[in-house]
Image (tube, rainbow, N blue to C red):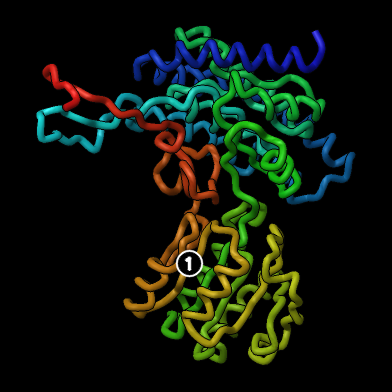
């Protein structure tokens, strides 16, 4: 069969599997998760060999270093991935939960029950750990998942997928609950984006080019985020020691991720006190400072920023810095240049902290904490399938609940519409 027929066949098989998965009890789904973790651990050497093959190919193609770093399963990513699978076992199964219970005047009882979305297609780049995270979350939430990773991670993704599917065979879960697209042909994506009869939702994870392609060409609903232009605002009352620690963690913990700090805003009254200390600490860690004129006055090692720096997602040791007059100006800057991802205020002023929470409507908003907490694992979701910066259906890190929808359920005693 040709490529189109092959991809549509995979999608149809996932659709058939999704019907069966929706009927599975929690015990069976958790047994699959446990067995998946066991099989992955047992196959670690073979999977790392496949990952090394992808890494070597990436270096030969001179792929940018941040993308190569995302491709690796090392550096603690393997342990986090396996632990994420096991953590999902402990999470409450959302399928079948009834909420918003009420009784109408005629005695009709009404609730809303969580149900699976159906078939979810993940289209992503690098990060082979997404293969496992996405599969674990989707199946626990009663969905089938089609995984189309980037060509740069094909060997890693196929090796991981083989273990997940084998675990399904061993635990009574439909094997096609997890489908890894076996081809690197980009035309496969075009077919997936039009497979309305089999796929209910598309979730892309990757660079701006991939996100744009999916959003512009899909005839299926899409949940995505464009970029992680995350901000920290140093309020006038910010504690310098706390601010320094938070900024360093937000920028340096993992630079090649969407929740990393990209723009630092500072209240005018803190520009000659707190800001120089923070920028000195960043500079000593090798971070390039690109600042506004007031920033250049406060820190002589900064370079002049230009208009392209404020909306930039660097994913590198670079940070844009701007001194603003007040809280209102900081919020205006976030609204203009932000990407609805993550914004944090560092302050000891309660009124300002609450105004920040209320007025900044990004998907994750914080007070006195690192932007790195905009992560499903850190927020207690067990793992995340992605971060949505579009407000419909889900917003922010998406865990199990974000992979379900709700139906109305009615319980009566013979009530008729009057």
Horizontally, residue 308 falls left or right of residue 177, namely: right
- The one nearer the camera, 63 or 414, is 414
Residue 56 coordinates in the image, percent (x, y): 83, 35
Horizontally, residue 26 falls left or right of residue 336, namely: left
Residue at the disc numbered 1: 344
Residue displayed at 57% across by 55% down: 259
- The one nearer the camera, 149 or 111, is 111
Horizontally, residue 88 falls left or right of residue 11, namely: left
- The one nearer the camera, 112 or 296, is 112
Q: Quadrant of residue 287?
A: bottom right
Residue displayed at 70% across by 21% down: 181
Is residue 46 something that shows in the picture? no
- Location of the C terminus by quadrant is top left
| Mark 1, secondary structure of its residue | strand
Q: Quadrant of residue 359?
A: bottom left
Label 1 crowding class (10 Å Cα cut-off): few <14, some 14-19, many 20+?
many
In the picture shown, does residue 246 fall above or below 174?
Answer: below
Residue 119 coordinates in the image, percent (x, y): 54, 23
Is residue 385 something that shows in the picture? yes
- Location of the N terminus by quadrant is top right
In the picture shown, does residue 321 fall above or below 218?
Answer: below
Q: Quadrant of residue 145?
A: top right
Residue displayed at 83% across by 45% down: 63
Residue 5 coordinates in the image, percent (x, y): 75, 12
């Amino acid at each position: 069969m040709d490529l189109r027929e092959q991809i549509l066949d995979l999608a149809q098989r996932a659709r058939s599997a999704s019907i069966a998965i929706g009927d599975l009890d929690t015990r069976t789904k958790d047994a699959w998760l446990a067995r998946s973790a066991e099989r992955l651990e047992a196959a670690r050497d073979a999977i790392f060999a496949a990952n090394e093959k992808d890494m070597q190919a990436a270096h030969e193609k001179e792929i940018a270093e941040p993308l190569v770093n995302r491709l690796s399963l090392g550096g603690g990513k393997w342990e986090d991935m396996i632990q994420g699978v096991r953590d999902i076992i402990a999470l409450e199964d959302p399928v079948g939960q009834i909420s918003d219970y009420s009784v109408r005047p005629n005695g009709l009882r009404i609730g809303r029950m969580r149900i699976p979305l159906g078939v979810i297609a993940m289209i992503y780049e690098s990060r082979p750990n997404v293969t496992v995270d996405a599969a674990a979350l989707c199946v626990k939430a009663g969905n089938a998942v089609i995984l189309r990773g980037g060509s740069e991670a094909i060997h890693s993704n196929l090796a991981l997928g083989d273990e997940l599917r084998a675990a399904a065979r061993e635990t009574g879960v439909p094997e096609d609950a997890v489908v890894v697209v076996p081809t690197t042909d980009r035309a496969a994506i075009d077919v997936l984006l039009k497979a309305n009869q089999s796929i209910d939702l598309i979730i892309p994870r990757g660079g701006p080019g991939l996100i744009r392609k999916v959003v512009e060409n899909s005839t299926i609903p899409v949940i995505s985020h464009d970029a992680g232009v995350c901000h920290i605002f140093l309020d006038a009352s910010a504690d310098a020691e706390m601010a320094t620690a938070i900024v360093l963690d937000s920028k340096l913990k993992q630079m090649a991720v969407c929740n990393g700090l990209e723009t630092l805003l500072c209240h005018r009254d803190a520009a000659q006190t707190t800001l120089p200390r923070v920028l000195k600490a960043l500079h000593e860690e090798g971070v390039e400072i690109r600042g506004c004129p007031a920033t250049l006055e406060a820190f002589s090692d900064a370079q002049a920023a230009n208009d392209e720096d404020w909306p930039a997602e660097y994913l590198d040791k670079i940070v844009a810095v701007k001194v603003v007059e007040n809280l209102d100006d900081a919020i205006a800057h976030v609204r203009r240049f932000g990407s609805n991802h993550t914004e944090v205020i560092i302050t000891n002023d309660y009124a300002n902290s609450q105004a920040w929470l209320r007025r900044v409507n990004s998907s994750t908003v914080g007070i006195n904490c690192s932007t790195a907490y905009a992560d499903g694992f850190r927020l207690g979701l067990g793992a995340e399938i992605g971060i949505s910066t579009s407000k419909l259906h889900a917003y922010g890190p998406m865990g199990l609940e974000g992979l379900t929808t709700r139906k109305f359920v009615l319980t009566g005693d013979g009530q008729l519409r009057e």
